[in-house]
Image (cartoon, helix red, strand yellow):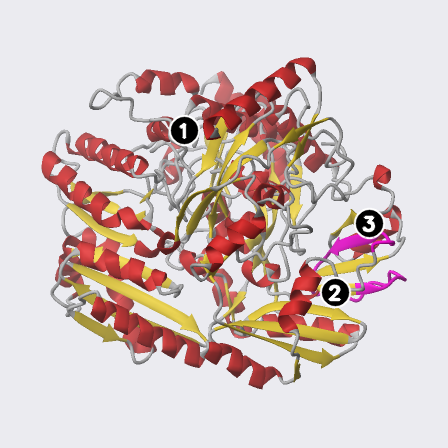
Amino acid sequence: MSAARAEALAALAAVRPPLAVVAEPERLAAYEMDAYVQKRETPLAAVLPEGEAQVQAVVRALGRLAVPVVTRGAGTGISGGATPLADGVMLVVTRMRAIHAIDAAARLATVDPGVPNAQVTAAAEGAGLFFAPDPSSQVVSSIGGNVAENAGGIHCLKYGLTVHNVTGLRAVDGDGDLLAVGGEALDSPGYDLLALLAGSEGNLGVITRATLRLLPRPEVTETLLAAFGSVKAGAEAVSAIIGAGIVPAALEMMDRVVIDACERYMALGLPKSEALLLVEVDGGTEEARESRAAVERILAACGATEVRVAKDDEERAKLWKSRKGAFAALASVLPDYYTMDGSIPRRALPEVLEQVYALGREYGMVIGNVFHAGDGNIHPCIFYDAAKAGELERSEELGGRILELCIDHGGTITGEHGVGLEKLRQMCLQFRDGEIAAFHAVKAAFDPAGILNPGKAVPTLKRCAEWGGMHVRGGRVPRPDIPRF
Amino acid sequence: MAHDFIKDTCERVKDHASRKAPLAIRGGGTKAFLGALPAGEPLEVAGYAGIVAYEPRELVLVVRAGTRLAEVEAALAAEGQALAFEPPRFGEAATIGGTVACNLSGPRRPYAGAARDFVLGARIVNGRGEDLSFGGRVIKNVAGYDVSRLMAGAYGTLGVVTELSFKVLPRPPAEATLAFEMDEPAMIAAVNQWAGQPLPLSATAWESGVLRVRLSGAASAVAAARAKLGGAEVADGPAYWEALREHRLPFFDPARPLWRLSVAQTAAPIAAGHPQLVEWGAGLRWVSGDLGAARARELAAAARGHATLFRGGDRAAGVFHPLDPAIAKIHRRLKEAFDPAGVLNPGRMDNF
């Protein structure tokens, strides 16, 4: 055992109240990666605190030794935010899973970071309330992770991201101090630290508690599934619906590759088409009915070849089955796939998707698209076979090209899954040195010693400079200094 | 001229930073009453105005920070859209940049979100005189820390906001205002209970035993909610909400200090001993009178919130609710990171 490791384990053993420490290599294997499967690493150790005081004690003890802390919830992140560091300790919050309060009158839930997302809604359901952010991993993924990634989901266009649905946070910063940010009131004095902590990928603080806003369940939800002869026609219908002043609760699209995979995997009897669009509108009974009728008219006007409307919850679940099971179905295409998470202005959807397919042809790789069309958040899935030499690397290179495409169209490299380790390189393309330096300064404000998840989320300027040299395309710097917002 | 403004601002800030000479950022000059007393040489920013990009179907607006709020709202209204946070102007010269810097939101706030919730991106000049862009023009974006949202409510102390992008929303097609006679405890219970139901609430305000409730949405939804809630329909609804938003109701007596207590929506009535107007689903309690800083903060804290001296009174005694030490530590470091020479609106947020 290295001296550094022995020292770290001794410091963890001294934490009071005593906490579970995992140090055996075979047990540490459980934490060697998150859902970003391209990278795995064995950490020095893992700890499983059961309360805030232990989290503080761990951060302080490891801070004194300059040992990095990587926070992990359920490990569902796909960008490597919870990939271990070889010289770091995993702080696993899965034992902090108490729902402290569901305050139905105030429409607030106060929960521990390890509580799975779906359990919040399950606990609030009896009061007619729900927690809006619904990442596809919601049955497993934890609230702490949702906050750290500013998770999105299917209903963001209408109900916002995680940051819009959190009113208070408690977090332990890099000094081991407890930050109580926001709370029950609609705002708080001073700078909006909650906005910084949301989406900070474990770099600014360890989330130890969250106060979540609960919303009343809409009276009625109407769900439609429309088939189109092309992705372009489907994307135009999306713009037409929003242009008509309707803000749907969900607008999800799938292309032919995904439809075929779903059909093979689940035999749902989906309409034969190049693109399927799922539209959900909700609200009061009459309002939802009116919206549905308006959407039906627009879908027909935009050339939908078939429109199915769910008559009840059972039919609604059936229509959603393809979308919700899409990723499982995709696993039947090839053994491995790599999901991208770019975000673009909605109007650019048809063009960007065309270019994504062209890139797939260039690399000789199949790409399927299932995405949040209403937000312009695309999830191209690149299929590969990791058993074949070089395929993983080529899929990563192709993925990088897709993210650059998003930047070129005025978009962003990550809509809801975070930068982690995965997109560090593209951060250098999306931002200039000044912004990258500002991000490091923000981190230093919360974590001066740099012990919280170092090396994730924001690249060093040095690495940007090294990568920059390799990234001149077509004789121009790929990051023209156009304002990005 | 556009390019020159940002370049000139960078130069000006650099020059002031080198001399540690404070700048007082000034847009339309309508919010000089808000926050701690501005100090320093004026930095005029209202000249950098105009809509950069607006595509209604994208629900995204990009605008220069000096653009008047009235102009932004007119452009959106022409397309049937609006800023959902319904910002007050407090004067016709109000700019969109000043609105965001103060994170000002109107009666719709509890049901639609605050100014900060609709900011998608911000271009700023920091205290080093660097032109930086954060966020973007897309609805979902988690690349980099959310510095654009941080600018909302930072009162210009972290950067001079030069351009902003927003998520905008369709304007609700129908509206109605209902009035109910209710005492304060009954009002607090009612507005919270209604907010837990799928009703198209868009504002509440209670004073002198009368609760007004605004409904906004599809005509059918408004009609259904009106039938469900009962109450008496008020004819002058729009005028009332505008007067509330702009603090032109008689309650807002300019001769008296105005305290803003932002508290838990379910907090019991606050015995402030001065007239109160309660809005935001009972989350915002305005107190008109010489409450005194210590008393205001004590009452707000007991109601699980914070107090701000919004207008008038003794601004030297501190305008904002004091921060706890760990939070203040982060504030100091952020200020140091964005404005190391301390030249951007120093002291406008009391200590920052």
The circle drawn on residue B297 is 3
At numbered mark 3, what does the secondary structure look like: helix, strand or loop? helix
Towards the viewer: A41 or B98:
B98
Q: Nearer the viewer, mark 1 or mark 3?
A: 1
Q: Dot 3 surroundings within 10 Å: few (below 14), some, or many (20 or more)?
A: many
Q: Nearer the viewer, mark 3 or mark 2?
A: 2
Image side of residue B243 versus residue B259, left or right: left
Image side of residue B255 versus residue B210, left or right: right
Marks 3/2 same chain = yes
Q: CA distance from mark 1 to mark 3?
A: 41 Å
Point out the stretch of residues depicted in magenta: B254-276
Residue type at the position of mark 3: Arg
The residue to which callout 1 is attached is A431
Give me the chain letter of mark 3.
B
Image side of residue A479 versus residue B28, left or right: left
Q: Position of residue A264 (x, y in %)?
A: 12, 61
Residue type at the position of mark 2: Val
The residue to which callout 2 is attached is B278
Question: Is residue A22 among the parts visible in the rendering?
Answer: no
Give me the chain letter of mark 2.
B
Q: Position of residue B158 (x, y in %)?
A: 62, 31
How many badges with numbers are in the image?
3
* Contact? badges 1 and 3 (CB < 8 Å): no
Q: Position of residue A403 (x, y in %)?
A: 29, 36
Q: CA distance from mark 2 to mark 1?
A: 44 Å
The circle drawn on residue B59 is none
Give me the chain letter of mark 1.
A
Q: Dot 2 surroundings within 10 Å: few (below 14), some, or many (20 or more)?
A: many
| Residue B59: quadrant of the picture | bottom left
